[in-house]
Image (cartoon, grey):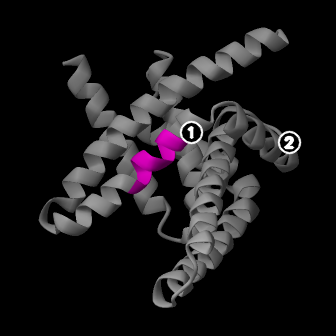
Amino acid sequence: MQAIGRATDYVILNFLCLICSLPLVTAGAALSAKYYVGMKLLRGEEPAVVKAFFTSLSRNLKQALLPGIVSVLGSGVLLWDWWYALSNDSPPVYRWGLILITIIFMMIVFCFFVILARYEIKTREAFKAALGMTGAHFGRIFLAVALFILPLIVSIWYLKWAWLICMFVQCVMLHYNSSFFVKEFDRLEEKMGL
């Protein structure tokens, strides 16, 4: 019953994150709120999921708004670059460079908003911490980004089941990433004596 309850909490969190991300500029704050509650659940704090999500969303909205806008604009530039690379006969080195830039961009954005979920720090400091975490845990953060993108790609072939595939993978990813970030943040806080 506890596992079913936790899975239900994860489904609710992912649904709330999706709804609150519809105005694209709030997607960062919604992601922060989702991981804020996910990390609380893994710590055994058992918050009221909906209330905790909206409390975190309102707390992080102001700070996450400008980085959210920058992330949306950066994503738009990358999408345009991808459209250009795929519609024209661009050289392989351009495509490989674009793959690398896209992956690094997504990893930094992901870490940035999860760091905002845990700490109340300045945007510049959160960005530096996201760069450091991306570099220190490249493989682990890469896997998190891949788990975000993979169901979207798979859903192209299984359109009928796309919503179920995406929801399942997002729930697994929320649990997996939250457990990683809880351990990593606890380790960092212990090292810094907080």
* Picture quadrant of residue 194: top right
Residue 114: x, y in percent?
A: 62, 40
- Give the foreground label among 2 and 1: 1
Which part of the image, by quadrant, shows the N terminus?
top left
Residue 89 or residue 130, whichever sits in front: 89
Label 2: state its secondary structure: helix
* Picture quadrant of residue 25: bottom right
Q: Which residue is mark 2?
A: 125
Q: Is residue 154 visible?
A: yes
Is residue 167 located in the magenta-colored stretch of the structure?
no
Is residue 144 located in the magenta-colored stretch of the structure?
yes
Position of 80 with respect to 60 (left or right) is: left
Real-space Cα distance between discs 2 and 1? 19 Å
- Please report the residue visible at 34 percent of the width from the left and 39 percent of the height from the top: 171
- In the image, residue 49 sits, relative to residue 81, either above or below, namely above
- Please report the residue visible at 24 percent of the width from the left and 62 percent of the height from the top: 155
Label 1: state its secondary structure: helix
Q: Is residue 194 visible?
A: no
Residue 150: x, y in percent?
A: 36, 53
Where are the magenta residues, as a range? 142-149
Q: Which residue is mark 1?
A: 141
Position of 82 with respect to 169 (left or right) is: right
Q: Residues within 10 Å of mark 2 (few under 14, many from 20)?
A: few
Residue type, numbered disc 1:
Ile
Residue type, numbered disc 2:
Glu
Residue 100: x, y in percent?
A: 61, 58
* Picture quadrant of residue 135: top right
- Please report the residue visible at 41 percent of the width from the left and 58 percent of the height from the top: 18
Position of 4 with respect to 130 (left or right) is: left
